[in-house]
Image: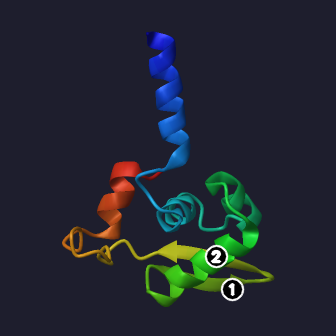
Amino acid sequence: MAATDDRNQDRAQGSWTFLTNHAHVLICVAGDGDARISDIAGQVGIGERATQSILNDLVEAGYLRRTRVGRRNRYEVDADRHLRHPLEAHHQIGELLSAVGP
Protein backbone atom coordinates (compact mmCIF):
# COMPACT_ATOMS: atom_id res chain seq x y z
CA MET A 1 0.00 0.00 0.00
CA ALA A 2 2.85 2.44 0.74
CA ALA A 3 4.19 2.18 -2.83
CA THR A 4 0.77 3.16 -4.20
CA ASP A 5 0.58 6.11 -1.81
CA ASP A 6 4.05 7.25 -2.92
CA ARG A 7 3.09 7.07 -6.61
CA ASN A 8 -0.12 9.02 -5.98
CA GLN A 9 1.79 11.65 -4.01
CA ASP A 10 4.44 11.96 -6.76
CA ARG A 11 1.73 12.38 -9.40
CA ALA A 12 -0.08 15.02 -7.36
CA GLN A 13 3.13 16.93 -6.65
CA GLY A 14 4.03 17.14 -10.33
CA SER A 15 0.73 18.51 -11.58
CA TRP A 16 0.34 21.71 -9.53
CA THR A 17 1.82 23.83 -6.76
CA PHE A 18 0.34 26.21 -4.21
CA LEU A 19 2.41 29.15 -5.42
CA THR A 20 2.45 30.65 -8.91
CA ASN A 21 5.53 31.20 -11.04
CA HIS A 22 5.26 34.89 -10.13
CA ALA A 23 5.65 33.97 -6.46
CA HIS A 24 8.53 31.63 -7.25
CA VAL A 25 10.37 34.36 -9.18
CA LEU A 26 9.74 36.81 -6.34
CA ILE A 27 11.15 34.34 -3.82
CA CYS A 28 14.27 33.85 -5.95
CA VAL A 29 14.83 37.59 -6.28
CA ALA A 30 14.31 38.08 -2.54
CA GLY A 31 17.10 35.58 -1.97
CA ASP A 32 19.47 37.14 -4.50
CA GLY A 33 18.62 40.48 -6.11
CA ASP A 34 21.65 40.12 -8.40
CA ALA A 35 20.61 36.71 -9.77
CA ARG A 36 20.76 36.31 -13.54
CA ILE A 37 17.57 35.62 -15.43
CA SER A 38 18.94 32.25 -16.53
CA ASP A 39 19.58 31.29 -12.89
CA ILE A 40 16.08 32.34 -11.81
CA ALA A 41 14.55 30.48 -14.76
CA GLY A 42 16.47 27.35 -13.82
CA GLN A 43 15.36 27.49 -10.19
CA VAL A 44 11.71 28.08 -11.06
CA GLY A 45 11.68 25.61 -13.95
CA ILE A 46 10.50 28.02 -16.65
CA GLY A 47 12.08 29.62 -19.71
CA GLU A 48 14.11 32.81 -19.69
CA ARG A 49 11.47 34.71 -21.69
CA ALA A 50 8.79 33.73 -19.20
CA THR A 51 11.08 34.80 -16.36
CA GLN A 52 11.73 38.18 -18.00
CA SER A 53 8.00 38.67 -18.52
CA ILE A 54 7.28 37.87 -14.87
CA LEU A 55 10.03 40.23 -13.69
CA ASN A 56 8.49 42.97 -15.85
CA ASP A 57 5.04 42.24 -14.38
CA LEU A 58 6.42 42.46 -10.84
CA VAL A 59 8.28 45.73 -11.57
CA GLU A 60 5.23 47.31 -13.25
CA ALA A 61 3.01 46.31 -10.31
CA GLY A 62 5.49 47.82 -7.81
CA TYR A 63 6.53 44.56 -6.12
CA LEU A 64 10.10 44.88 -7.42
CA ARG A 65 12.39 47.83 -8.07
CA ARG A 66 14.87 47.41 -10.92
CA THR A 67 18.21 49.23 -10.88
CA ARG A 68 20.70 49.10 -13.71
CA VAL A 69 24.20 48.16 -12.50
CA GLY A 70 26.61 48.20 -15.42
CA ARG A 71 25.20 45.77 -17.98
CA ARG A 72 23.03 43.93 -15.47
CA ASN A 73 19.89 44.57 -13.48
CA ARG A 74 19.56 44.41 -9.74
CA TYR A 75 16.13 43.79 -8.23
CA GLU A 76 14.85 44.75 -4.81
CA VAL A 77 11.60 43.51 -3.30
CA ASP A 78 9.13 45.98 -1.79
CA ALA A 79 8.16 43.84 1.21
CA ASP A 80 5.46 46.32 2.30
CA ARG A 81 3.29 45.81 -0.80
CA HIS A 82 0.07 43.91 -0.23
CA LEU A 83 -0.81 40.68 -2.00
CA ARG A 84 -3.18 41.15 -4.94
CA HIS A 85 -6.03 38.70 -4.45
CA PRO A 86 -8.90 39.88 -2.20
CA LEU A 87 -8.61 36.75 -0.05
CA GLU A 88 -5.06 37.64 1.01
CA ALA A 89 -4.90 41.39 0.31
CA HIS A 90 -4.62 42.08 4.04
CA HIS A 91 -1.17 40.42 4.00
CA GLN A 92 2.08 41.92 2.78
CA ILE A 93 4.71 40.40 0.50
CA GLY A 94 7.14 40.41 3.41
CA GLU A 95 4.87 38.03 5.30
CA LEU A 96 4.82 35.63 2.36
CA LEU A 97 8.60 35.77 2.07
CA SER A 98 8.99 35.18 5.80
CA ALA A 99 6.84 32.09 5.52
CA VAL A 100 8.31 30.51 2.39
CA GLY A 101 11.28 32.61 1.30
CA PRO A 102 14.99 32.03 1.55
Q: In front here: 32 or 57?
A: 57
Q: Looking at the picture, does residue 97 appear above or below residue 59?
A: above
The location of residue 18, given as percent across then percent down, is: 40, 52
- The reply to whether dot 1 and dot 2 touch (C-beta < 8 Å) is yes
Q: Is residue 86 left or right of residue 44?
A: left
The residue tagged 2 is 74
Q: Looking at the picture, does residue 34 appear above or below residue 100?
A: below
The location of residue 5, given as percent across then percent down, is: 44, 20
Q: In front here: 59 or 5?
A: 5
Q: In front here: 89 or 30?
A: 89
Q: For the image shown, how many numbered marks are present on the structure?
A: 2
- Earlier along the polypeptide chain: callout 1 or callout 2? 1
The location of residue 54, given as percent across then percent down, is: 58, 76
Question: Residue at the location (73% across, 75% down)?
Answer: 49
**Amino acid type of the residue tagged 1 in the rendering:** Arg
Displayed quadrant of residue 38: bottom right
Question: Residue at the location (43% across, 57% down)?
Answer: 19
Disc 1 from disc 2: Cα separation = 6 Å
Q: Identify the mark at residue 68; answer none if there is no mark.
A: 1
The location of residue 66, given as percent across then percent down, is: 59, 83
Displayed quadrant of residue 51: bottom right
Identify the image's colour scheme: rainbow, by chain, secondary structure or one colour: rainbow
Question: Residue at the location (59% across, 84% down)?
Answer: 56
